[in-house]
Amino acid sequence: MPLLRDLAMDNFPVLSLLFLTLPGGALLAWLLPRPGWARGIALTTALIDLVIALAAVYLFDPQQSGFQLVEKYDWIPGLNVHYLVGVDGISILFLPAAVLLFIGVILASWNSVHTLPRLYYSLLMLLETATLGVFCALDTVLFFLFWEFTLVPLYFLVSLWGVGANRRHAAMKYTLVMLAGGIPLLFGILILAFGAAAAGGPLVFDLPTLLATPLPTSTQYLVFLLLLIGFGVKVPLFPLHTWLPLIAMEGPAAVAALLTGMKLGVFGLIRFAIPLAPTAAQDLHWLLAGLGVVAIIYGALAALAQTNLRRMLAYASLSHLGLVLLGLASFNMQGLQGAVLQLLNFAIVAGGLFLLASHLHHRTGSTDIANLGGAARSMPLLASFFLLYGLASMGLPGTSGFPAELLILMSTFKSHAGAGLAALFGMVVGAAYFLSIYRRAFFGPASRQAVIEAEDLRPREYWLALTFALLIIFFGLFPALLLDLMQPAAEAWIRRLG
């Protein structure tokens, strides 16, 4: 088996296959004669991609700290830009997590997309390509290409298949905000390239070389702040978060699951902003911790005031992102591992909650609490899974949320005791808003006929929800399987901070 792993790592372009499968599926969806076949093609393609992603995890050697499964080809030789992809222990687990969430979105859209199904599922597959590219790109220009390309399918998915009256406004606002955030991100990438070439060499865009080329401290401050703003609009950091509740209400709930489940902005901070400007990041630890505290408190209090499930989940996501920022601001092993675990949780827990909210909306026509009373009577399976996912988001022991939040809290109390107390307060408020809104939405007498006659989870929805539930419980009981995989890469990440 080790020989097979070494051979595959040297010769087999597993990551490129992961990308190219999806555009091929999108093309096939357009070429086949029946539009109704598009969803089956999308699901089949995503399942193939899941197998490839799991194969990448198998081929990955957890004992090594560097980048693996690396592929490098000339792309723009005149600028020293390459097609360079690879993964380490921090990024490898995001590949199957992302593919699994996209499978959930495809299944959640199975009976709800009747207009232009070819276009819808093709856009989903292209969005999945860009998302996986963000996790794998090791050339900053290639990363920026994948980063910006996510905007194209998201704009059309929200504007054409959104459920709110202001869906086009929501799509336009999201796109413009992300384009604005791309400006400081691009400037940061260019400063990195020219800074690394300051000695008279060529421009440098590949991440391994940039990591081996320390920048002057003054340049680090500029780079870190530019990347923090560029990634912050997609995290989203307060006060750059206003697009998130708007998309949650106006866009398709299944697509909102992708935006809450795949936190590409935080991944960008972990992969690029902090390790490329380590001195500036540590000197500005108070900024990261402060943004985390504000997000925790503001998100929790805003969620407590909501009367709609989807809007509540959007603000709850903002609150939990604050915990991740606190973990990163501690700059220690526990904080980083807790932050990465929490990001993986977002894919299953936060994404799963939005998928269940999507099922509710398709069945009852609403996710307003006033219109959902008694939903547990007609949809006991959906209500049960929603409760489990919600308890996982609260960090209940035995769920995957517990080790992530425990690691973050332990690291935060070591570095920012006051922020740790604020995090505990936010977690208490988080329990209050979830249990309160869950009780009002799923219990009590059912007053609307749509709720009384609503169908419970269909078989494919049930098996997906069960898969998510089993992952939540399994990794809640055995988190060491994930922590051991990421430990060498996490140790290397910490060493860069000195």
Image (spheres, rainbow, N blue to C red):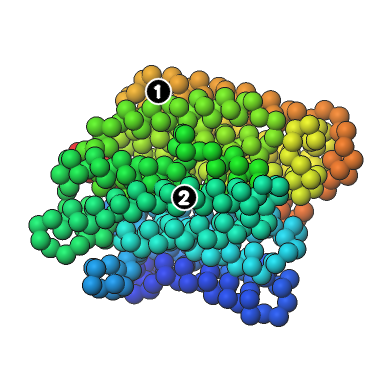
Q: Position of residue 135 (x, y in %)?
A: 41, 56
Residue 123 vs 299, above or below: the answer is below
Q: Foreground: 309 or 492?
A: 309
**Residue identified by numbered label 2:** 178
The three-letter amino acid code for the residue at tag 1 is Ala
Viewer-side label of 2, 1 = 2
Q: Residue at x 60, y 59 (%)?
A: 156
Q: Position of residue 148 (x, y in %)?
A: 44, 58
**Secondary structure under badge 2?**
helix
Residue reaching furthest to the left: 199
**Secondary structure under badge 1?**
helix
Q: Position of residue 69 (x, y in %)?
A: 35, 65
Q: Foreground: 392 or 293?
A: 293
Mark number displayed over residue 419: 1
Q: Foreground: 79 or 492?
A: 79
The three-letter amino acid code for the residue at tag 2 is Met
The quadrant in which residue 417 appears is top left
Disc 1: CA contacts within 10 A as few (<14), some (14-19) or many (>=20): many
Q: Residue at x 22, y 61 (%)?
A: 204
Q: Residue at x 78, y 31 (%)?
A: 370
Quarter of the image for the C terminus: give it: top left
Q: Is residue 352 left or right of residue 10?
A: right
- Name which of mark 2 and mark 1 comes first in the sequence: 2
Q: Residue at x 80, y 35 (%)?
A: 371
